[in-house]
Image (tube, rainbow, N blue to C red):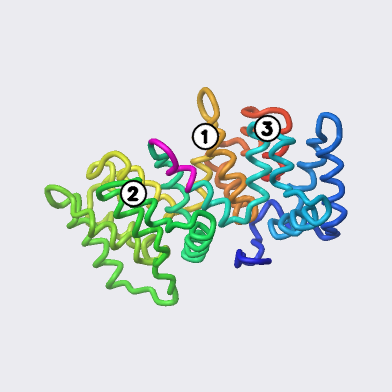
Amino acid sequence: MEGDHSLPPSAYATVKAYSNFDADRDAAALEAAIKTKGVDEVTIINILTNRSNEQRQDIAFAYQRRTKKELSAALKSALSGHLEAVILGLLKTPSQYDASELKAAMKGLGTDEDTLIEIICSRTNQELNEINRVYREMYKTELEKDIISDTSGDFRKLMVALAKGKRCEDTSVIDYELIDQDARELYDAGVKRKGTDVPKWINIMTERSVPHLQKVFERYKSYSPYDMLESIKKEVKGDLENAFINLVQCIQNKQLYFADRLYDSMKGKGTRDKVLIRIMVSRCEVDMLKIKSEFKRKYGKSLYYFIQQDTKGDYQRALLKCGK
C-alpha cells in the first residue's frame, strides 16, 4: 500500500483482514448501497468494519476506478452525523486519520488541547514519524509549526518534544543506575524544591524508553512522598498538568489509559462522541482487545455494554463492530 508503512497486523486487533477479500465485489456492493433509496447503511457498515485498513484502501481505489467518484466523497453525501464520522475515519489510513484529527484540533479559534494531548502522548515513534510525513503531505506545512503557533509556554515545549518522535526505543539493557538517577532528578526538579524545573521533567519523560520510565516511576516512590501522578497535580496546572498526566498514564499502561478515556467519554450525562469515535476507530486494529479487557477489569461491565447504553441506531452498530 502506498505511503502508510503500516505496522504488522496486531494480535490485539478487533478489526482484522477479511480472508475472502475481493475489492471489486466490495466496491460494487458499496455503490449499490449508496445508490439505493434511503441508503443501505447496514451493508456499508458490514463491509467497512469487516475489512482491514489496507483492504479498505483497496476498496476505495476499486470504487474510484468503477464510478469515477471518490468513495469518501460518496459516503460523505450518503451518510450524516456520528455514523459518517466513524465511516470516514475508517477510510483514512491511520496516519491520515491522526493528522486530520490534529489539524482539526488546531484549526480556527481556540485549540482542542485534549485531542492534541491524546494523540501526541499515545503514539509511538514510528507512528509519529509517519504522522509528521503525512501532515506535511496533506497540509503543506509542518505539524510542529502548527503546534508552535497554537500553544504556548511549557505546554508547547512538551508537545513539540513529544511530536518529534525521538523517544529512546532500545529496551535491551536495563540501566538501574540511570533508573535511580532519573527518579531522583524528577523528585529534585519538582516536589523537593520550590517551583518546578519543568524542562528537566520534559527531557526525562520525552527521551527515555517506556519500559525504563515505568521503572523510574516505581523508583520515584522511594524518594517522593507522592507518586508521579500526585506530584504532577501538586506541581503544575492547566494544559501542562493535563498533558503530563495523560503522558504518565500512557507510559504506565496505554490500554488502561484508553479504557479510562472511553469510560470518561460515556459516563454521566451526554456522550463525548468525538473521543469515543476517535478511540474506537484508531485502536480497533492496534490493541482494542487489550483495551476491552482493561475496561472490563476496571469498570465491572464490558465496553460493549457501555456503548449499547450510550449510543443508538446505525452509529451504535458501527461502533460495536469496531470493538467486537
- Identify residue type, mark 3: Ser
Residue 143 lies in the magenta stretch: no
Residue 24 percent across, percent down from the top left: 85, 56
Give the labeled residue for mark 2.
Answer: 149
Q: Earlier in the sequence, mark 1 or mark 3?
A: 3
In the rendered image, the vertical position of residue 161 relative to residue 278, given as above or below: below
- Identify residue type, mark 2: Ser
Q: Are marks 3 and 2 in contact (CB under 8 Å)?
A: no
Q: Tell me which residue sits at (48%, 47%) in the image.
A: 103
Secondary structure at numbered mark 1: helix
Q: CA distance from mark 2 to mark 1?
A: 28 Å
Give the labeled residue for mark 1.
Answer: 265
Q: Earlier in the sequence, mark 2 or mark 1?
A: 2
Residue 80 tag number: 3
Q: In front: 19, or 142?
A: 142
Q: Which residues are magenta?
A: 103-109
For disc 3, the neighbor class at 10 Å (few under 14, some 14 to 19, many from 20) is few
Secondary structure at numbered mark 3: loop
